[in-house]
Amino acid sequence: MAYFELSNICNAKCIFCPYPQIYKQKDLGYMSDDIFYKSIETAYALGYKKINFTPTTGELFLHKKWSEYVQYVLSDARSESVYFYSNAILLDEETVNKIALLSNPEKISAIFFSVGGVDRDSYELMYGVDKFETVCKNINLLCEKLLEINSNIKVNCELRIPSNIQPDIEQISKRLNIVDYKNFHLDYIDRYDDIGGTVKSENLKLLKQRDKTTPCYRLNDIRFDIHGDIWACGCVVTEQINNDELRLGGFESSQVDIQASKERLLENWNLGKTPSVCLGCRLYKGI
């Protein structure tokens, strides 16, 4: 899968994300037309047909041209599927209408939303902003609109709550989907990666570490950041400051050079030279 980071700016400060710790050290901004259209061609040339518009530590809907770029990929015969992820804070009526107007929606495998808490206080604890009611309202707006136009787009919400709260999944699901949109689904995320120790909170339970004997399957993914740099893995571990171990190339890198960098990365892992950012990752899954 190819990931496109249209924005590395976020409108939340989640305790399970490194963004609050690293954003002041980042060169913040948005992907330009030039970088996007060059990067999507590079992705296709490398054989990627599944396109993901989920930023690692940013919010997609902050980019004013997000729907234009998504539509471009949906309309391209070379793409197989598209999906994207948001915190739903900006999922207002205008954004919902843009989603409803996307053509070739059958290519959208799902739209994911990160939602949190069981009330205003627990949401703010997890996301660092007071937007619980806004998010609930917005997701209902989307479900209502998709039901109205008889859409089959999947809406997947991932629930994140403090570790000391046991959620009533059915009640939360009903609150987010009052109209009972048939393609709505709610998952409960109760374990997290600490991003090599960057994320620290007593309110989170961590995933267990795994033996990393073979290269991680996520290294088969590729990420294009807002500056045109190209990275192996679409995971947030590539966001660690001053670490470019997973960088495969830049805006002007050739297809041959990018592929060679990827093969070298996998070869080094098999030789016991696992990248340091991967050693601490709890999301590992072997090839």
Image (spheres, grey):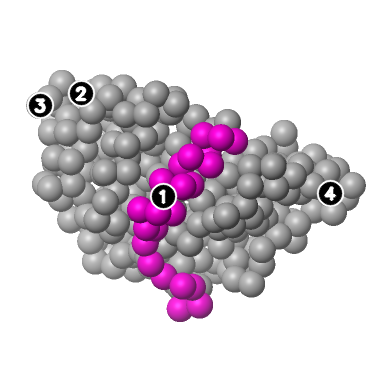
Residue at image x 58%, y 31%? 47
Q: CA distance from mark 3 to mark 2?
A: 8 Å
Give amino acid for label 3.
Answer: Glu
- The three-letter amino acid code for the residue at tag 2 is Ser
Q: Quadrant of residue 7?
A: bottom left
Q: Earlier in the sequence, mark 1 or mark 3?
A: 1
Q: Which residue is mark 3?
A: 148
Residue at mark 1 to residue at mark 2: CA–CA distance: 28 Å
Nearer the N terminus, badge 3 or badge 4? 3
Q: Which residues are magenta?
A: 24-46
Question: Which three-letter amino acid code belongs to the residue tagged 4?
Answer: Asn
Closer to the camera: disc 1 or disc 4? 1
29 within the magenta span: yes
Q: Which residue is mark 2?
A: 151
Q: Nearer the viewer, mark 1 or mark 2?
A: 1
Question: Cβ–Cβ below 8 Å for labels 4 and 2?
Answer: no
